Image: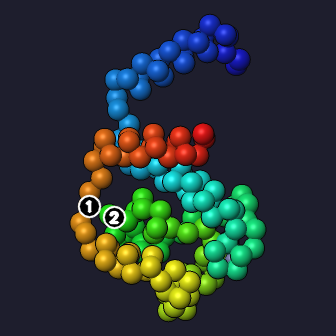
């Protein structure tokens, strides 16, 4: 069944009203921010794999954390902690061979490695307003 223009407009109004009434859950905000932040990282790294230097696009472009989210929530949205990798380098090398991965990163980005190791033990829980602020920031960065 096709929606009439009137019904479509009503539905849009209802959605807008719902957005005002029920703020997005923290996990929804994180999901939105993950996506924007990932785009920011790929742009920053010039859509190129930091490891093998091949150009990447679409599903082959992976924003990849150095210190995993599960270890450091504090570094989750820190651009220093994320690099663009191709599918192969991310899955076959970074995750399957962590010792080689660490050695590569340490050698290629020594200052970043030092910084991340200093910061990784800081405890952090993301507040709604912080996520919203970062979303606004990365939206501007990504969408201009
Ligand atoms: Zn690669």
Which disc, if any, is residue 35?
none
Residue 101 shows up from this direction? no
x, y (%) of residue 72? 34, 69
Q: Is residue 2 above or below residue 89?
A: above
Residue in the picture at 53% in, 40% down: 140
In the image, 91 versus 129, the foreground residue is 129
Quarter assignment of residue 76: bottom left
Q: Are marks 2 and 1 in contact (CB under 8 Å)?
A: yes
Q: Secondary structure at mark 1?
A: loop
Residue in the picture at 52% in, 42% down: 139
Can you say which quadrant of the picture contains the N terminus? top right
- As measured in the structure, the alpha-carbon distance from the residue carrying label 2 to the one carrying label 1 is 6 Å
Report which residue position mark 1 lands on.
124
Chain-order first, disc 2 or disc 1: 2
Residue in the picture at 24% in, 66% down: 123
Residue in the picture at 61% in, 84% down: 93
Report which residue position mark 2 lands on.
73
């Amino acid at each position: 069944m096709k929606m009439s223009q009137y019904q479509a407009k009503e539905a849009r109004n209802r959605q807008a009203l719902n957005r005002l009434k029920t703020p997005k859950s923290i996990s929804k905000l994180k999901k939105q921010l993950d996506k924007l932040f990932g785009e920011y990282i790929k742009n920053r790294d010039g859509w190129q794999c930091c490891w093998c230097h091949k150009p990447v696009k679409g599903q082959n472009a992976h924003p990849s954390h150095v210190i995993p989210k599960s270890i450091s929530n504090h570094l989750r949205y820190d651009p220093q902690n994320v690099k663009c990798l191709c599918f192969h380098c991310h899955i076959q090398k970074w995750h399957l061979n962590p010792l080689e991965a660490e050695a590569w990163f340490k050698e290629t980005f020594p200052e970043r490695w030092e910084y991340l190791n200093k910061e990784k033990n800081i405890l952090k829980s993301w507040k709604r307003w912080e996520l919203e602020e970062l979303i606004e920031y990365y939206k501007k960065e990504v969408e201009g």
